[in-house]
Image (tube, helix red, strand yellow):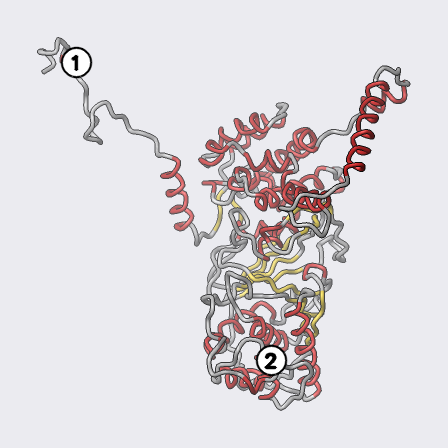
Amino acid sequence: NAEESGQSPDSSPRRSPSSGSPNTRSRSPSPGQRRKSSRKRKTIMEKVSKRDIHWRKVGEVLREMMRSKIDSVRTLRKYFSRYSAEPMIHEQALVGLEKALAGQDREDTRKKRSRYVAQGPGQHPSQPMEQDSEEFDRTNDSISRAVSAASNSSEVQTSPAQAEETEAKPKSFSEDFFTRILPEICKRAEKITSYFPKGHIPVLRSDRDDTINLTRVQVASVVANMFLCAMPNNEISFANLLCSQQTYQVAKLRFFIHYFDRLSQLEDQDQPEGFVHIIKNTPNTHFDWVNSNITLKSCKVKFGELENEKNALNIMQSHANLGGGLLYRGRGAEEIRFCLYPELSVAMFVCNKLNNHDSVMVKGAERYSAYVGDDGLTLRFDGDFRDETPKNTDGTVLSACVFMDPNKFERGCAISEQMGKSVMYQDLTKLFCGLRSTPDTDMFQCVATGHWGCDHFFNGNAEIKILLQWMAASAAQKPLVHLVSDCREDRQTHVILNSLANKAVEASITVGQLFQSCMDVGEYHPRLGVVLARIAKALNLDIEGAPDSDSDSADDQ
């Protein structure tokens, strides 16, 4: 065929031995294939004993970044692409970082606020604002006079003092990021090999209790490498946040930029002091909840935010993979907590996937930011926050979060299913494992909790969850503080639970009696909103504000 077409045999198309099509070379994997292989690699490396550091190439690029003058996101992307194999950085060009530096994490809030201010509080957004014609003319006249005055003032010579004030304009946040914050991130990331001279970062053991103590300077270096997507194999990186256009994801990125902003303002002799302790607890004893004779401790319901409760162990719901969807599309209480306390994110790197009864306590993290928003979807950065939590003699912040993943239920799950013995045993074992008496927990006076396991992901019943946490805290010999919001349902729970707790403590009700009452009430299929009233009736306690529990239907509503 080659001779008939006038071509030489050497010029005929050759077939690749690995593929059946002609003129085909071994192609590099597509971005979609790289993402699939990355997910597969993450699944394989769920259980690791250490995380090796191979940052020779990364360190060279970081040192070059510190010597160079990076003044735009486009220039920064070129450096990222030299050491990061994350395909999102190549495809979407750090759009999220560009939006965060432009202050677009609060764009929707500003638009909404300005719209309602312009239209008046009593008008619907679709209705045009009514305005008197004479007032409209007066407004136009005032605007035209202001424009003419501004044009005339441009011809007037300015004084030297006014000229200096005009020249000394404050830098924009984007300029400040490239001139001060980004060099600080690169400097801390480049020092990680000196902070971990053994060549790897330790990881918590998955089969027993274990503790890892890291200095806050080491933690800042690890978080800096996560921010720059410089971790080995891109296991844990900020690539998704750096490239996302979702407003709440841009807001999450803004919290971490502010963390490095605060660090860049410190002098060399004023570096963060103290340690961040990551403590993993596994159940080592079997607690008999049915026959427990430990009397219930006090349980108080307060209005407020969980992170503002001082000198208390904070119970936080988490996913089996600590951090949940912080670096992706997660927007629950766990992700918000990690944004407010950026040093918590180091636990994502040193923790394997949690087993059914495991818990992890992170002690020593500091809060850096304020926020607004009722949930993760409306989360917005709201400026700097100065944490006044007391510190230990070595500078360690006396704050502690206990992360546990509660049981997950289907939406509309029956109350009786959540009050089954085995289900309650699993949550109680996990709670007691994280709250039991140890040198790390004994330094805190009480246990503080919010709506643990009651969000749209876990779908737990709030009344059952608070009873379980009350029993676990009492078994650990600690009082419980339940933080609620000022909504109608929480106000009703505030009255009923306070009354139930006071009467139960006065009657010396034990943990075993409360657990048995929960099992008895669960057999009668109580409807929503009357679980606490049914528990009080089973314990022969007369409480205030309880709804009429005699009208319960046989089925859940």
Left or right of 555 on screen, residue 529: right
Q: Circle 1 — which element?
A: helix
**Front residue (pair 56, 502):** 502
Q: Residues within 10 Å of mark 1 (few under 14, many from 20)?
A: few
Marking on residue 374: none
At label 2, which amino acid type do we have? Answer: Leu
Residue under the image location 46 percent in, 52 percent down: 49
Counting labels gives: 2
Left or right of 394 on screen, residue 220: left
Of the 4 image quadrants, the one containing the N terminus is top left
Residue that badge 1 annotates: 10
At label 1, which amino acid type do we have? Answer: Asp
**Furthest residue to the bottom?**
540
Residue under the image location 70 percent in, 41 percent down: 263
**Furthest residue to the top?**
6
Residue under the image location 56 percent in, 37 percent down: 96
- Residue 74 x, y percent position in the rendering: 56, 26
Left or right of 18 on screen, residue 349: right
Left or right of 192 on screen, residue 53: left
- Could you tell me how far apart the alpha carbons at marks 1 and 2 are, in whole angstroms? 87 Å
**Furthest residue to the front?**
133
**Front residue (pair 307, 26):** 307
- Residue 326 x, y percent position in the rendering: 55, 50
Q: Circle 2 — which element?
A: helix
Earlier sequence position, callout 1 versus callout 2: 1
Task: Give above or below for 249 relative to 82.
Answer: below
Residue that badge 2 annotates: 532
- Residue 538 x, y percent position in the rendering: 58, 88
